[in-house]
Amino acid sequence: MKNEQPGNCYVACEALWHLLGGSASGWDPEYIRVDGGTHWFLVLGTQRLILDPTAAQFTESLSRKNSG
């Protein structure tokens, strides 16, 4: 899985987190390890809804890739 734009996921998530209201929004930044690096995304509370502004850079689901 080749990441065509490494490093943009953190900045995109940080900006989106602030636009959504920061810590008051209920969204939390999280990351997973992918191909020797990290990939950042936002997760909403106990529902575990995922908001990933840079998900399109990947050709397969990261949840499948990192599920073992």
Image (spheres, rainbow, N blue to C red):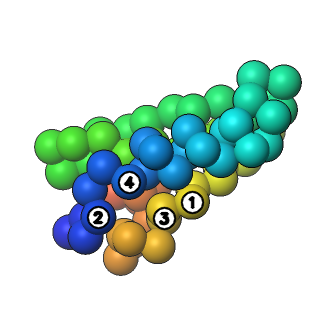
Q: Residues within 10 Å of mark 3 (few under 14, many from 20)?
A: some
Which secondary structure lies at badge 2?
Answer: loop
Is any atom of residue 39 visible in this view? yes
Q: Do labels 4 and 2 touch, CB within 8 Å?
A: yes
* Amino acid carrying mark 2 in the image: Gln
Which secondary structure lies at badge 4?
Answer: helix
Which residue is at the front of the view, 17 or 30? 17
Disc 1 to disc 4, how far (Cα)? 10 Å
Q: Which residue is tagged 4? A: 8
Q: Quadrant of residue 36?
A: top left
Residue at 65 percent of width and 47 percent of height:
16
Q: Residues within 10 Å of mark 2 (few under 14, many from 20)?
A: few
The circle on residue 53 is 1
Disc 3 to disc 1, how far (Cα)? 6 Å
Which secondary structure lies at badge 1?
Answer: loop
Q: Which residue is tagged 3? A: 55
Percent across and percent down for residue 12 are 52, 51
* Amino acid carrying mark 4 in the image: Asn
Residue at 30 percent of width and 41 percent of height:
38
Percent across and percent down for residue 43 are 66, 39
Percent across and percent down for residue 67 are 39, 47
Is any atom of residue 45 visible in this view? no
Percent across and percent down for residue 1 are 23, 68
Disc 4 to disc 2, how far (Cα)? 6 Å
Q: Which residue is tagged 2? A: 5
Question: In the rendered view, would you say 22 is above or below 57?
Answer: above
